[in-house]
Amino acid sequence: MAASPAPAQAERISGQALLSWRREQLAAGGSPNDLDWLLDLQGGVTWQSLQQLRLHPQRQLELRCPRAELAALWERHLRGGEPLQYLVGRCPWRDLELAVAPGVLIPRQETELLVELALEIADDGRTPELWADLGTGSGCLSLALARAWPTSRGLAVDCSAAALRQAEANRARYGLEDQIRLLSGSWWEPLQPWWGQLQLVVSNPPYIPIPVWQELTPLVRNHEPALALSSGADGLEAIRRIAKGARNALAPGGWLLLEHHHDQSSAALELLAAGGLEAAQARPDLEGKQRFAIARAPHPP
């Protein structure tokens, strides 16, 4: 993996001065967790190091960038509601550090479980030679699967040019250009040359109902792409399209793994069954809510 470019400046500071600066920033508003995340990712001060400074405030440390730069980013976050991930241009996810920018969905922690579900299926002796990622966004799922299955080939689809640019940058950063092919288009359409050959397909499609999306916090609603979040009045338009085309696109016995809204489990399973898939199952997220649906294409009689 290529190293991130080093900041132009750094700042030597005592723990006491840093803790005082932190209190000043929080007095202006915002979440302590968010500020500590910024200190970690942009300033190079881990949460563990921050706790140690409370016990040893005279200890000296070096910030990767000066406090003035961190304060400016924090002010933009507070004033305009811009996500910190966009402001620093990076987002830790699983064992990756992904480049993110406006126009691409910020990867969420629960989506990491889609990777775990795929690896669980592979543990049963079905490591796929050819797989696909529908709505790849930043490319997070594709990168994780390609690194887990280095002899496999992946096809990553998105209809957003901005998302594909970001996925391309992340693919290059991890040296996976020969393993992951990026395709522009809507859901199954760009994959037609490989229909019937896909042994596993993952997707984190848009699934938030429009009325729910309209009530999201401004941090999400005003900055992250609605195209990657919302999908019709009931949130199921994208899942309907994916389920409808899955049987033709999947290889016999091939698996489809979907993320959906926390209250869409029954509807998602019904759509997969109606699309001709079998062995449909619900799987929980980190909070125990049914957040994922998996099913497979039947084998010929």
Image (cartoon, grey):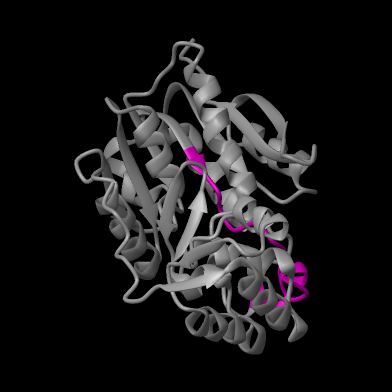
Using residue 40 as the reference point, say whether residue 127 is left or right of it.
left
Q: Residue furthest left?
A: 178
In the displayed structure, 71 sits above or below 140; it is below
In the image, is residue 300 above or below residue 81? above
Residue nearer the viewer, 84 or 242: 84
Residue at the farthest bottom position = 79
Which residue sits at x=53%, y=81%?
73
Is 193 situated left or right of 98 in this image? left
Task: Name which quarter of the figure residue 208 lies in.
Answer: bottom right
Q: Residue at x 69, y 77 (%)?
A: 20
Q: Is residue 209 one of those drawn in magenta?
A: yes
Residue 103: % across, % down = 46, 72
Q: Judge left or right: residue 105 versus residue 291.
A: left
| Span highlighted in magenta in the image | 202-221
- Residue 127 visible: yes
Please, is residue 115 above or below residue 104 in the view? above
User: Which residue is at the front of the view, 215 or 143?
Assistant: 143
Q: Give the x, y percent position of residue 117.
A: 57, 29
Question: At 55% from the left edge and 21% from the top edge, which residue is drawn?
Answer: 120
Residue at 36% x, 47% y is: 156
Q: Position of residue 275 (x, y in %)?
A: 59, 36
**Depth order, front residue of 23/144:** 23
Q: Nearer the viewer, residue 24 or 123?
A: 24
Q: Position of residue 168 (x, y in %)?
A: 29, 57
Q: Residue furthest front?
A: 58
Regarding residue 103, the answer to whether it shows in the image is no
In the depicted structure, whether residue 300 falls above or below residue 231: above
Q: How many marks?
A: 0
